Image: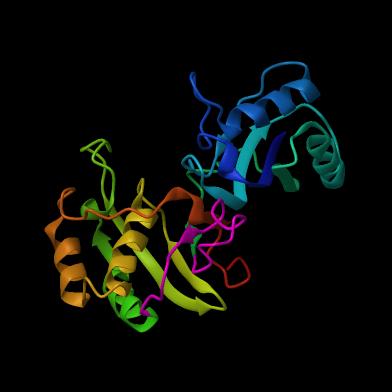
Amino acid sequence: MRIKMTLAYDGSGYAGWQRQDNALGIETIVREALERLHHHPVEVTASGRTDGGVHALAQVIHFDSEITMGNEHWVRAMNALLPLDIRVQDAQPAEDTFHARFDAVRKRYDYLVSYADNDPFAYKYHALYHGRLDVARMQRCGDVLIGTHDFTSFTSARIDPRKSRVRTLYCCKVIEEANGVRFQLEGNSFLRYMVRMIVGTLIEAGRGRLDEADVKAILEAKDKHACRYKAVANGLYLVKVWYGESEEDR
């Protein structure tokens, strides 16, 4: 039986989702919990990798299991084995062909900036900024990026050059909050560092250093050297992954 499971985690203490030889990835912890339940190794596939320090409210994974349990029992059993900074939110049976990564049709990431740079509890979960950002200017610059584009300028140079860098950005909202700013991005999928580089660019706009023409020029350059900005990891959250196109799914 294939199980679709949704996880939330605080990425502060981990080197990202992926299991690694020389650092602790969240995948390693999840696989160890599943192995204790099954008494044998269990392969896990996630909707995508999150980098070190990045958080998730709804990371989706799948794995195959011979154990028969109800959804609530899966949640309780896994949470009894996982540390408190990794929590299972939901578990349910899926079609044998379901794939957490390849079946995803849309993802949402939020990025949080806080003006409370004197708050010792904020730094793990926000990017800290001293002063005020121009929200209207950032929104105008974000609007430039909405649509289907080649996002080569907003990704890592380490991506396989044979892979397409064309992505569709459905939503790029800049929302002023009580003591900071929330960036909300939705797309069909995201390249490595894409959200952080877009947000880093918009923050530069919010500081008055870039305008819409500058952002358009960076995008149209399709050059990994065109964008010099990347926001820190700890303000980033994977918020939702969609697996259907109906209004209900959204």
- From the viewer's perspective, is residue 51 above or below residue 243? above
Quadrant showing the N terminus: top right
Closer-to-camera residue (203/101): 203
Q: Residue 38 appears in which quarter of the rendering?
A: top right
- Left or right relative to 178: residue 141: left
Q: What stretch is highlighted in magenta?
A: 114-134
Q: Which residue is drawn at 26% across and 47% down?
A: 164
In this view, the residue in front, 208 or 71, is 208
**Residue 157 at what x, y percent from top left?**
23, 40
Q: Is residue 117 magenta?
A: yes
**What percent of the width, then of the height, locates residue 22?**
48, 20
- Colour pattern of the rendering: rainbow
Q: Which residue is drawn at 49% across and 43% down?
A: 50
212 over 118 or under it: above or below: below
> Residue furthest toward the top?
40
- Corner quadrant of residue 83: top right
Q: Main secondary structure of the magenta part?
A: loop
- Is 39 situated left or right of 55 in this image? right
Give the residue furthest to the bottom. 136
Q: Is residue 8 visible?
A: yes
Q: Residue at x 51, y 32 (%)?
A: 18
